[in-house]
Amino acid sequence: MGLFGVAGLLLGVVIIAVAMSLTLSSATPSISSTTTSIASISGGPTTTSPTALQIAERATCIADAKTVGVAIGAYQATTGTMALPTSAAWRAALLGTYLQSWPTSSLYVISVAGSARGHVPPGSERPDPGRFFDGDVLVTIVASGTTSDATVHPDSACATL
């Protein structure tokens, strides 16, 4: 798949994610959490299941983070540049050619760690897995202010939505 094929695929993913987000945000707010009644009857702990809206918001967040991650990979492969100094520099480098627009949400913020945080060459082991490094896709949950590394932990970065 050539660069245009990857760009087309990314555009398709972004369009689907935006359509899902718009469709679900206009849904009626009557969707509510359900609790597991068997556990509460037996005296065990109750668990709250995520609503359909929460599941869709998490899926959109994960798709946004992965879209930015793929754009970073395409940028690095095309330009040979592995490190940029700031999140703003990454954003400027990706917009236009690799991303049509930056993913936005009122629930989370997607950013990219700059080289001021440290650089790990591709294929190298991270010296500190708990630290953010250059080119890592970061997800900050607005409600809690928590920032997670979607490059290292793609499944859990959006889990608290």
Image: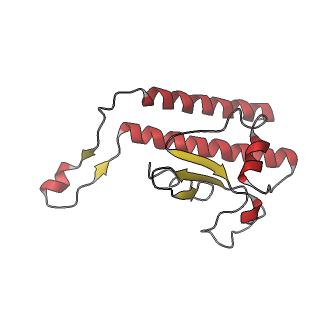
Say which of 13 and 18 sits in front.
Answer: 18
Residue name at image x 44 percent, y 52 percent: 160
Say which of 105 and 136 sits in front.
Answer: 105
The quarter of the displayed image where residue 129 is located = bottom right
Q: Which coloring applies here?
A: secondary structure
Number of marks in picture: 0
Reply above or below: 34 against 45: above
Residue name at image x 70 percent, y 62 percent: 133
Q: Where, quadrant-wise, is the N terminus in this rendering?
A: top right
The x and y percentages for residue 119 are 76, 64
The x and y percentages for residue 120 are 75, 65
Answer whether residue 2 is visible to the viewer in this image.
no
Asked whether, in this view, residue 103 is left or right of residue 41, the answer is: right
Asked whether, in this view, residue 161 is left or right of residue 70, the answer is: left
Residue name at image x 76 percent, y 61 percent: 115
The quarter of the displayed image where residue 117 is located = bottom right
Residue name at image x 64 percent, y 29 percent: 12
Q: Residue furthest bottom?
A: 127
Answer whether residue 93 is visible to the viewer in this image.
yes
The x and y percentages for residue 100 are 71, 32
The x and y percentages for residue 34 are 25, 44
Q: Residue furthest right?
A: 80
Asked whether, in this view, residue 96 is left or right of residue 63, the answer is: right
